[in-house]
Amino acid sequence: MALEGRRLRRQSAIAAGAALIGLSAYFVGAQSSTVDSAVNAAFTKYQGLQDGKNADYIPALAKVDPKLFGIVIVTPDGKVHTAGDVNTQVSIQSISKVFTMARVIQDQGPDSIEKRIGVDATGMRFNSIASIEMIQKGGGGGEMNPLVNPGAITATSMVQGNTPDDVWNKIVGTYSDFAGRRLTVLQDVYKSESETNDRNKASGMLMKAYGYIKSDPMQAVDLYTRQCSVGVNAKDLAMMAATLAFGGRNPATGKQAINPENVPYVLAVMATAGLYDDSGKWLYHTGLPGKSGVGGGIIAISPGKFGIAVVSPPLDDAGNSVRAQRAIRDINQALGGNPYAVKARATTTNNNQ
Ligand code: GLN
């Protein structure tokens, strides 16, 4: 009897294992052509779409070719599927905020971000000064997160190092681990944004005045401006997204950028606030944690299934790339990437009994 039980348990364990392998093999292998066709279909469909407008409050961004359009998706086997221009670099802009937050969570734990900044949507624009005033209401119980400018500048101020260069090396080193190659600053963007970032300076000052930033706020704003000016192409962004999709480990280099247990915290804030005040709308249609930047990039993550990135500079009113949103929505739909969409299970019990 005992022997029989053990054999049965072993058999069902083998069956479960085989089902699991079968499932991931299905996504990794058999679907490779499906992934390619989904990517190509979205590229063809939206290539001619001209809605939206480049960001111009940072003068260098207005000069980027609005026709630039590239799509990259990375699947669990590390395979990179592409369409369009995936090599031209744009500035990472707000997508950087995800990876600075990841650095702080990795070094100081998830509580550090929740307590110092908060993890709730502001419901306001990404550079809202009013949102800073609102967090003062009710003694600091307001809404803020590390993916809008005031919270992001605060997160940058939390990265530890003996000198600004130390801090910078940590930040750019983290981004590079996620991307799988050494990333550098686009100097023209850094210069242009440094000359026009008065609003971010005001945000930094206020966050200091209210005790969120504890060090020199102008140093934090400068490092934040530098991090936003880091150059990335669609492939880099997709690899960064894939690293988050697959337990914090870069699928190309095998390097563990952050511990797997920290990834869910990063994804949760992305789901809450990754597309600013359109985050709810985005989640409603995709179910995916995502992050946009005013450089025209958007990344999105289907945990365990894929990391995807699209670059296309023209933005909608909320500051999110028009074509990137559309393309990711279609591809996600075609590949069944929405983690909330689960097929009903067949049941063996008769509910009428
Ligand atoms: N560097 C930009 C800013 O601070 C980033 C904003 C964004 O991408 N939404 O305004």
Image (cartoon, rainbow, N blue to C red):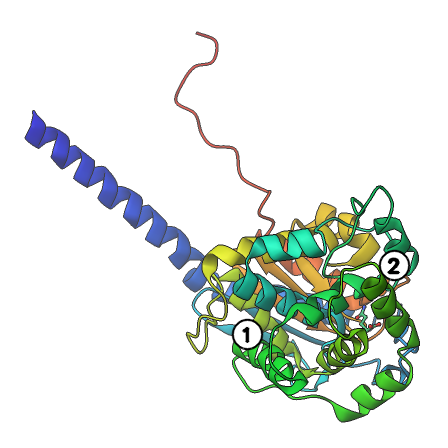
- Residue that lies at the very extreme toward the top in this rendered image: 353
Amino acid type shown at disc 2: Arg
Give coordinates of residue 197: x percent, y percent.
88, 78
288 in relation to 236, above or below: above
CA separation in Å, label 2 and label 1: 27 Å
Identify the secondary structure beneath mark 2. Answer: loop
Query: Which image quarter is the C terminus in?
Result: top left
Can you tell me which quadrant of the image ligand 1 is in? bottom right
Who is closer to the viewer here, 21 or 254? Answer: 254
State whether residue 148 appears in this view: no
Residue at the disc numbered 1? 178
Identify the secondary structure beneath mark 1. Answer: helix
- Residue that lies at the very extreme toward the bottom in this rendered image: 187
Give coordinates of residue 314: x percent, y percent.
85, 73
Please tell me how crowded label 2 is: few (under 14), some (14-19), or many (20+) other residues with Cα within 10 Å: some
Who is closer to the viewer here, 129 or 210? Answer: 210
Drawn side of residue 294 relative to residue 8, left or right: right
142 in relation to 244, above or below: above
Drawn side of residue 171 relative to residue 275, left or right: left
Drawn side of residue 144 relative to residue 82, left or right: right
Residue at the disc numbered 2? 125
Quarter-wise, where is residue 112 in the image? bottom right
Residue at horizontal 45%, vertical 29%? 346
Residue at horizontal 73%, vertical 80%? 223
